[in-house]
Image (cartoon, coloured by chain):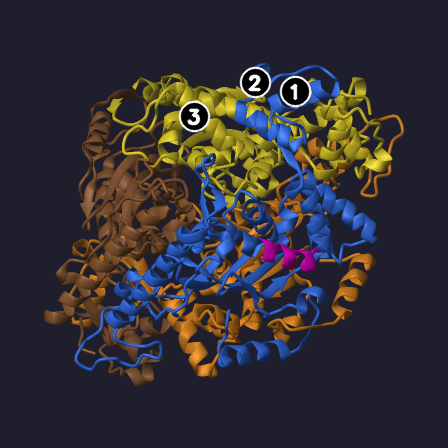
Chain colours: A yellow, B brown, C blue, D orange
Amino acid sequence: MELTPEQTAEIDAQRESRATTRRATVPDLEELLFQPIPLLDHGFVRVIDYMGDDAAIVQAARVSYGKGTRRVQDDAGLINYLMRHRHTTPFEMCEIKYHVKLPIFVARQWIRHRTANVNEYSARYSVLDKEYYIPAPDQLAAQSSSNRQGRGAVLEGEEAARVLDILRDDSERCYADYEEMLNEDRDGNRLNENREGLARELARMNLTLNTYTQWYWKIDLHNLLHFLSLRADPHAQYEIRVYADAMLETVRRWVPITCDAFTNYRMGGVQLSAHGLDVVKKLIAGEAVAQEQSGLSKREWRELMAVLGRDA
Amino acid sequence: MELTPEQTAEIDAQRESRATTRRATVPDLEELLFQPIPLLDHGFVRVIDYMGDDAAIVQAARVSYGKGTRRVQDDAGLINYLMRHRHTTPFEMCEIKYHVKLPIFVARQWIRHRTANVNEYSARYSVLDKEYYIPAPDQLAAQSSSNRQGRGAVLEGEEAARVLDILRDDSERCYADYEEMLNEDRDGNRLNENREGLARELARMNLTLNTYTQWYWKIDLHNLLHFLSLRADPHAQYEIRVYADAMLETVRRWVPITCDAFTNYRMGGVQLSAHGLDVVKKLIAGEAVAQEQSGLSKREWRELMAVLGRDA
Amino acid sequence: MELTPEQTAEIDAQRESRATTRRATVPDLEELLFQPIPLLDHGFVRVIDYMGDDAAIVQAARVSYGKGTRRVQDDAGLINYLMRHRHTTPFEMCEIKYHVKLPIFVARQWIRHRTANVNEYSARYSVLDKEYYIPAPDQLAAQSSSNRQGRGAVLEGEEAARVLDILRDDSERCYADYEEMLNEDRDGNRLNENREGLARELARMNLTLNTYTQWYWKIDLHNLLHFLSLRADPHAQYEIRVYADAMLETVRRWVPITCDAFTNYRMGGVQLSAHGLDVVKKLIAGEAVAQEQSGLSKREWRELMAVLGRDA
Amino acid sequence: MELTPEQTAEIDAQRESRATTRRATVPDLEELLFQPIPLLDHGFVRVIDYMGDDAAIVQAARVSYGKGTRRVQDDAGLINYLMRHRHTTPFEMCEIKYHVKLPIFVARQWIRHRTANVNEYSARYSVLDKEYYIPAPDQLAAQSSSNRQGRGAVLEGEEAARVLDILRDDSERCYADYEEMLNEDRDGNRLNENREGLARELARMNLTLNTYTQWYWKIDLHNLLHFLSLRADPHAQYEIRVYADAMLETVRRWVPITCDAFTNYRMGGVQLSAHGLDVVKKLIAGEAVAQEQSGLSKREWRELMAVLGRDA
């Protein structure tokens, strides 16, 4: 990620401004405000604004006249209770806003989460930057043979080199052709006086899906945690997971008690099916139990044994 | 509206606390923060928190690295443009949180707006306060004879007195019986040692719909403006309109440029149908035009003439 | 539940009408269509319309040109997979519409589920029926002493009788006073020529929360299952649970494969926290483990032991 | 649009199947069911399922026990009333499901409408077809000089030819390279035994934004009309407008009364601002009025004069 001097100056100016407020304020998150966290080769995530803190969750759950909080221990107890029993509405009372730069194919996964507010940079209106994602060599994975939706071993040698060449060449050429069709640069200067230039809303279709876009993205804490539980998960595609991981760290600074509860009850927890629970009960009772009689499919059995740290 | 000394102390404590923030801050709204605005006989609305300001709308629309704003005039121009062309997503980038005390029958209208976050005081969990709404005499209206969904003239004399007596007596009795069935007061003290007390989740069913409830209610600016356009409208029931009117004033303090645009393009504007537009064109051209040939129903014709300030 | 002869005739007429369609059709659900399922003393739920079936979920998951289904066994395998891995979007491709008659205090819980479409009978516009909920004697429960949000033992003897008398008397009086204030009956006839009659939108505030209302309620299958997982749960209040239980039976007729998966993975399953999973692993390994060292609160420990069928 | 023989057979099989139903059924829409409507060069839209009809809107608005409809004239009157006064919930009681094939850059605009259910063909899981959008010559427009977000005159001669060559060549090359990196064809056959093949979730990033994708998309009638009011509008990009136009025709078959009301009150109507209304009143009164004194910007003035059919 490289910012232009102008962008850096704008960010610095925002970081230097200070105001006095009566609102719930979180110094640990303030420290990070507006600062881009670099991700992938040209991406970033920046916290732009936030509303509320751990105490605001307690306050809303109690529909309080004041802060609503009591001792830290009580607040943590209530937050754990809410998380455990899926009383989700108090977590909706906190809100956060990010500025994100991300490859278009990642943006397409991300946007499926509909309970957020989004303003994307418009390629109908403006010319996109020449920035595209090329995976680092250790992320250049083969198709998984066991999972139609996953990655296998890392490609090596000639095949890896060939893939990198293709990605780079096609991105370069498609962007160069985008510019040529537009017949203008990012500042709106016409390149060739004898040509009209294709409409921006059309020319963009020539870009590849690894081109970077950017958006402002705003969401409440409950829906953010749901997003993170899916996208910071090992089954998520690496390229979106790095964003989720970075955002989870911003959540840790922002609402540390909630983040602990989330880690214990969601990220580190596990959902057992009725059949799976039966197997667990039998194992605790020391009874023999085999996949064939368990009501679990082979795959479910393997997943359950993995969760329990046992050989399948 | 009367607060207990404890509630007043809690509110004062929150108002006195101050923090330093890098976030967008609006002094005019800060002044009002946490302060209850009294409404009806026991209700109120209080701003608890907010995110963003007029500049944040501009910033999101431009997907900016910095504040995104230029001259005030440019910002107003952009906000007007967004409002006029119903580019709604930048307005979703601001968020506000209220604490509201309101009669249950008003809460039932209000909750139909689904694009908000809500935490309501739970009458399964707690005992409700003894507070119920009795209309002021000048709001004791008869059923409208022309509009099945509206009010007519104000009731007077004996009939008015009788209605007020009924409302007061039934509310009193139902609340007294609620307490008796519960067999506990608000602090959880048992009233009669020889009785068990009915479960709170059951006893509440005896309360009348004018009983006050309260909730935390959080919404983004776009959806708030939509709510206000419907509920600050003359067709809205008076008892919800007073809340909408008070909230519109908080919006004016918070995002004055947006509030002006909203007033011009939504609240003070008008939607013409295709047939209505034809009538307007003919009127401008000085042509005679009658309801019968206009494609408008009698009611639509009356409404259009009213909008144009002409006799129907 | 008693319907008027006119209502019965309207329902019968709809049940008798038949049409030919190319759409996915479920005979088991068709059989039930429009038929009210009686609930509580005056409530009901009726299926009014539906879209899709088990095969439509498979079809959407595969983005198929045709029916998308293969062998029943394959379809069940895919639906189980989707349910297990919380791939929720294919379940959103089915939709169902109910007509529900329910007490207002139940409606207030119900409406918190925002991802549905609702049309409620308007008491601004019309006069409500004289129908109110009185619990059956075996549902007249005391407040739970251990759970602030639950019921304890059933009330008996004089206290029970007193509660029933109160509920009945207050409901009767409030409804009678509602009619008197309105000064009209349900057919719009004025009762007393010398009075105006209070506006319907005001008079309704005198009704008690056990008064029945009704609405059309439409929701997709994914969000319906989420609703049912919360409201058909033993922790839900009895008066809403009977509705959820009845609706779960309609789901069983409609999408039996999905309903089985839901029963196994959601309703009959259990969520373990990270700490809870550690306890389970130790128990399986035959290690001693005590609440104090487990990281679980006493309450969590009790709940976990209950789930595992062990003494706490 | 060319379907494979297998796809055609699947569609035909679905069209031939018939069932008997008690549900609201619309013969005019049944006729069209499953049939692809070709759009652009390889796209289509197909109606897969629907719920409700004009009468279902009336039924929900009245919360009826039976069909709810009276005379056709009364139903139309009620639907006009609902549309005019933006009583939107009855329109939410109808639902429709489409299968759409569309270029990715169109899908990215489309998905911003969040109030729909979507299942997209997964390029993590499967290999995308070799189909990409190339504009017809009469749609190869230059950038508009007056509107940063619009098209100007059609490109001609050498520049047009050059653009078409670029689009075709880059799409071809990127797809060929996608296949080479994948090292498999659509049926999963390995192309070169000495290579592993890049994971599908990575290889897809090399595709251009004009590549076709497809999805199942389901939405209620109210939100569909909102989508159409924005996307069947002349300001919408041509490539999404052709989809909206085709879908509007399916709406006309499905709910003709609602479609008429929509055409009159939304598509053919106009929103006047408070300032704009003042101008109209003065014009009707025969008063002189100039842009400078009107409170309208030059652009707003131009737009208003255009709407009124007057010279600016």
Q: Residue at horizontal 61%, vertical 74%?
A: D26
Residue at 37% x, 42% y is B194
Dot 1 corresponds to which residue? C278
The residue tagged 2 is C295
Identity, as a three-letter code, of the amino acid under mark 3: Val
**Are circles 2 and 1 on residues that touch, CB within 8 Å?**
yes
| Circle 2: residue type | Gly
For the N terminus of chain D, the quadrant is bottom right
> Horizontal and vertical percent for residue B270?
28, 62
Residue C166, above or below B101: below
Q: Amino acid at mark 1?
A: Asp
Give the labeled residue for mark 3: A47
Q: Which of these two is toward me, D4 or A202?
A: D4
Q: Is residue C287 magenta?
A: no
Disc 3 secondary structure class: strand
* CA distance for labels 1 and 3: 35 Å
The answer as to whether the residues below labels 3 and 2 share one chain is no
Would you say residue B115 is visible in this rendering? no
- Give the image quarter of residue A292: top right
Closer to the N terminus: mark 2 or mark 1? 1
Query: Residue sitting at 66 percent across and 78 percent down?
Result: C18
Label 3 marks a residue whose chain is: A
Residue B258 visible here: yes
The answer for which chain carries disc 2 is C
Q: Residue C26 location, x and y as percent?
A: 70, 64
Q: Please tell me whether the stretch drawn in magenta is mainly helix, strand or loop.
A: helix
